[in-house]
């Protein structure tokens, strides 16, 4: 091999290495894009706070609309009479009902190849981790069959619903001067992870038979059978009850109050919402293209 030819081969190695790094970077970026959720429909008014779920201050407020892409850190607050239907990159579906506050705490998914958009997936196509936090309100959901390494959890102040694959309903609502967490498993696998003063009673508990939350108790996991329901509650005046009220009051844009007759109101306070500044994206550095499914951007 001539000296000149040898020199050319050596100089070609550096660009090829850079090329490999760029390819790997693109793959990691694509994996991050898969960890999203897409809003399929909205009725009424649901407010979205971008990236403010953890610090509970700041963030850009805007009305949620069909086609929006949700990411880790986003929070949704729904008003009276509103509803939103959301689908995740692992195919799981969620209906957010009125007077509900929900945060996306963690949203991760390994890359996969599919010709289907999110809502057409029949099972989790790759390892995924989803952690949502329900501060107040009610959700209906359908988590498609998950892989063994995947998880889909919904955390509340009174317990966590660990969902393996089912149609379910979860609500953290104020009723009869108490907060009550109710989890309904329609046809699959759901575990309730919580702390109570006694072993958890599964089923539709009557007054006086509810599972009382106790932050000093050991954490227990209770399977909720198909067509089963489980409740956990805390009474007005308890430290946990007061902590829930304080937590709701700390959420930007929510106006929370308990009246003298024990009625709780959770409403959106529009006076605290700062309109998002108008931003003109640079077509070179920010073309505005968002991958909403592995193979289909529609």
Image: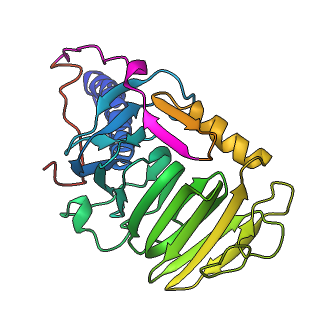
Residue 296: % across, % down: 16, 53
Q: Relative to 277, does residue 269 appear above or below in the rendering? A: below
Q: Relative to 259, does residue 51 appear above or below in the rendering? A: above
The answer to whether residue 242 is visible is: yes
- Count the marks: 0
Residue 156: % across, % down: 60, 53
- The residue lying toward the viewer, choosing from 105 and 206, is 206
What secondary structure do most residues of the magenta stretch adopt? loop
Q: Which residue is depicted at the point 26% across and 60% down?
A: 118
Residue 192: % across, % down: 64, 69
- The residue lying toward the viewer, choosing from 49 and 248, is 248
Residues in magenta? 263-282
The answer to whether residue 148 is visible is: no
Please say whether residue 230 is one of the residues in the magenta stretch. no
Image-quadrant location for residue 248: top right
Residue 8: % across, % down: 27, 25
- The residue lying toward the viewer, choosing from 206 and 149, is 206
Q: Relative to 266, does residue 115 appear above or below in the rendering? A: below
Please say whether residue 268 is one of the residues in the magenta stretch. yes
- Colour scheme shown: rainbow
Residue 222 horizontal side relative to residue 113, left or right: right
Q: Could you tell me which quadrant the N terminus lies in? A: top left
Residue 296 horizontal side relative to residue 103, left or right: left
Q: Which residue is depicted at the point 33% across and 59% down?
A: 112
Residue reaching furthest to the front: 261
Q: Which residue is depicted at the point 32% across and 64% down?
A: 91
Q: Which residue is depicted at the point 24% across and 48% down?
A: 292
């Amino acid at each position: 091999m001539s000296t000149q030819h040898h020199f050319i081969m050596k100089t070609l190695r550096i660009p090829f290495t850079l090329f490999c790094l760029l390819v790997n970077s693109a793959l990691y970026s694509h994996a991050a894009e898969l960890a999203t959720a897409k809003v399929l429909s909205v009725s009424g008014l649901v407010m979205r706070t971008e990236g403010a779920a953890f610090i509970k201050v700041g963030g850009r407020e805007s009305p949620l609309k069909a086609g929006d892409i949700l990411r880790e850190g986003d929070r949704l607050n729904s008003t009276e009479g509103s509803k939103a239907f959301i689908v995740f990159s692992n195919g799981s579906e969620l209906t957010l009902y009125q007077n509900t506050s929900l945060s996306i705490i963690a949203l991760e998914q390994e890359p996969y190849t599919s010709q289907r958009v999110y809502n057409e997936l029949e099972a989790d196509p790759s390892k995924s981790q989803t952690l949502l936090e329900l501060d107040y309100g009610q959700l209906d959901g359908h988590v498609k069959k998950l892989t063994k390494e995947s998880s889909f959890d919904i955390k509340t102040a009174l317990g966590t619903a660990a969902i393996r694959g089912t149609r379910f309903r979860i609500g953290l609502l104020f009723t009869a001067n108490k907060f009550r967490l109710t989890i309904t498993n329609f046809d699959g696998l759901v575990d309730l992870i919580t702390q109570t003063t006694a072993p958890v009673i599964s089923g539709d508990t009557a007054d006086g038979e509810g599972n009382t939350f106790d932050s000093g108790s050991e954490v227990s996991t209770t399977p909720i059978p198909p067509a089963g329901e489980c409740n956990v509650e805390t009474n007005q005046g308890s430290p946990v009850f007061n902590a829930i009220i304080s937590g709701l009051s700390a959420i930007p844009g929510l106006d929370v109050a308990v009246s003298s007759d024990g009625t709780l109101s959770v409403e959106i306070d529009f006076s605290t919402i700062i309109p998002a500044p108008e931003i003109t994206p640079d077509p070179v550095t920010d073309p505005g293209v968002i991958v909403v499914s592995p193979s289909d951007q529609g």
